[in-house]
Image: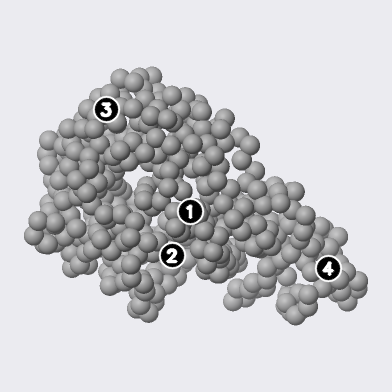
Amino acid sequence: MDNKKPFIKLFKSMNQYYVFDVNTNSIICINKEIYEELKETNSIDETKNKQILTLKKRGYLKENNEEIRVCHPALPMVEKYMEGNLKQLILQVTQNCNLRCKYCIYSGSYINRTHTNKRMSFETAKKAVDFYFHHNFNKDTAVISFYGGEPLLETELIRKVVAYCELLFRGKELHFNMTTNATLLKDSMVDFLCEHKFNLTISLDGPEDIHNNSRVFASNNQGTFQCIMENLKRIEERYPDFMENITFNAVLDVKNDFKCSSNFFTYDFMKNALVTFTTLNENGSKEEIKYGEAFDINYRYELFKCYLKYIGRLSPQFVSKIIDEQVNSLKSEIQDKVSGPYNRDTICHPSGPCIAGAVRLFVTVDGVFYPCERVNEKCNAYVIGNVENGFYIDKIKSLLNIGSLTPKNCKNCWAIEYCNSCASGIEEGGELSAKKRIERCDEIKKGCELRFIEYCTLKEMGCKFE
């Protein structure tokens, strides 16, 4: 008789019963009898059930280690890593924009950002690029991204930065990215973007009526759809091959018909493009954001169709490109993790945070460093350095090691290895908040369980993630 409670998470699909064994990071298919016994008791009587005894002999169903510490394993290597492994530099060339999208975090609907007339000087941009150059030497590729506001308001600055980067990074593979609303894609700028092989991420929400609900010009409050489509068609006519460099991102707000937005991206010139989607950013929103039942039903129907594709029951042409990326991510989020070697060691930490600034170093118009473009620029907790003084290593470590804010919750959480929560959005009063971090936990665990069910259901139906 073993009176210790196993560190597990039980879940079931429509046809099967499963136990996720936290200590071994394994998903095990079990029968209903074992499922019910594990569900109803806090301890295991292995003498009653030979199958439970077999699982125990194989190293499963052990209790949690109460002595385990919550600490990110990469913490000791942060300073050394930041010396030469920066992946991407993102330059906020302006805080201004020619649109006033109603859901934009700069729109006035959020407490942490607003549009301003601030713009980055070439001097600041050059210092940021130089800093990146000296901290990118271990990487085979350099990636420079232009961000706003709307970056195409600063075309001359962009041209000068590109020319400088091409001289500085000679001999290294160099890529340029830009996130744009596409309303300012005039012929001369398109010529430049094509010549320098830019990758564009264009914000486009779907059909005209849906897109124009939120994306409007600042000057007259008119929708931007027709302008964007005309620019895209002109690019397709002049530089058809450049369409392969364009990715579309749709923001699906509470008023959108998900199905219409999803079906829209079947246009001929978009058929091969990558399409991603985001929902409204809840961090710092002045009003509560609620998605309706119709949105949820349409989303789940498109998700169901995507499942059918992955088990060979539906042609890809009938599947939403918006959803496809989400289901495809099950491989990296679950399959690659549960199929790899794993042993719960003496330390543990949520998997969500990255080394702040190493993946997407965001530099504001004033030359201040942030972990990425998603964090609150008005919160000092996220400032990780500047172009004059370099990195604040202690700040980077604190953003990486956020599990230390909530050690008891984290070390006893079955979903710790699948927790996607980073430091973004947990600020309160200028500091990182344990309370706000814990407020996310229930939704994160629900999401993890749903992803496990999705993964196992697809496996049951014959999906080969390998």
Residue sticking out furthest to the left: 220
Mark closest to the chain's N terminus, 1 or 3: 3
To which residue does mark 2 refer? 306
Q: Nearer the viewer, mark 1 or mark 2?
A: 1
Q: Which-is-in-front pick, marks 4 and 3?
A: 3
Residue 123 tag number? 3
Q: Which residue is mark 4?
A: 4
Helix, strand or loop for disc 2: helix
Apparent side of residue 308 relative to residue 231 in the rendered image (left or right): right
> Which residue is tagged 1?
431
**Image location (x, y in percent) of residue 359:** 46, 40
Q: Is residue 98 above or below residue 286?
A: above
Q: Residue at x 24, y 32 (%)?
A: 121
Q: At label 3, which amino acid type do we have?
A: Glu
Q: Earlier in the sequence, mark 4 or mark 3?
A: 4
Query: Where, by quadrant of the figure, is residue 244 drawn?
Result: top left
Secondary-structure class at tag 3? helix
Q: Amino acid at mark 4?
A: Lys
Whole-number angstrom distance, CA of label 1 to CA of label 3:
31 Å
The answer to whether residue 422 is seen in the rendering is: yes
Q: Are marks 1 and 2 in contact (CB under 8 Å)?
A: no
